[in-house]
Image (cartoon, rainbow, N blue to C red):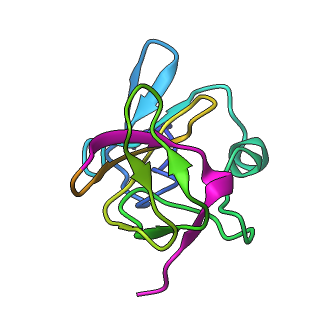
Amino acid sequence: MSDLPSCPQCQSSYTYADRDLFICPECAHEWPQNASDEGFQALAIKDSNGNVLNDGDTITVIKDLKVKGSSFVVKVGTKVKNIRLVDGDHDIDCKIDGIGAMKLKSQFVKRVSE
């Protein structure tokens, strides 16, 4: 039927191509068209313990983190729900209660098993 690959995240067959990306309309996952399955898995974002992180995971902060430009500090043990993974140096987008929207580095968090 279609020669487009299934979504690597939710296995949906309804993917479509947009410029140089494949997009899944069911989970909103995007990945490059020229990425092989092995290369795509190598780009997986891991927490401080080596566990692979996914969109929607719950994480815990493992180190006090100063918020740049303010007097806030994200304390050790702060639980963050429903994270979103992004490209870049700070690879986690999230909302922290009492502080707001933040970007975190994956090396300062660990995944919480639910």
Residue 34 vertical placement versus 25 (above, below): above
Q: Which residue is drawn at 58% across and 27% down?
A: 33
Q: Which residue is drawn at 21% across and 54% down?
A: 98
Left or right position of 64 against 97: right
Q: Residue at x 45, y 38 (%)?
A: 67
Q: Residue at x 57, y 36 (%)?
A: 90
* Number of numbered discs: 0
Q: Which of 6 and 3 is in front in this view?
A: 6
Tell me where the magenta segment starts and ends, as one range: 99-114
Q: Can residue 45 be seen in this view?
A: no
Q: Which of 28 and 88 is in front in this view?
A: 88
Left or right position of 31 against 102: right
Left or right position of 63 against 43: left
Q: What x and y, as percent, mark residue 19?
A: 44, 12
Q: Nearer the viewer, residue 47 or 31?
A: 47
Taking the magenta stretch, the answer to whether it contains residue 50 is no
The answer to which image quadrant residue 109 occupies is: bottom right
Taking the magenta stretch, the answer to whether it contains residue 112 is yes
Residue 45 vertical placement versus 89 (above, below): below
Q: Which residue is most to the top?
A: 19
Residue 110 vertical placement versus 25 (above, below): below
Q: What x and y, as percent, mark residue 78?
A: 41, 68
**Image quadrant where one finds the C terminus:** bottom left
Q: What x and y, as percent, mark residue 2?
A: 42, 39
Q: What x and y, as percent, mark residue 76?
A: 52, 68
**Image quadrant where one finds the N terminus:** top left
Q: Can residue 96 be seen in this view?
A: yes
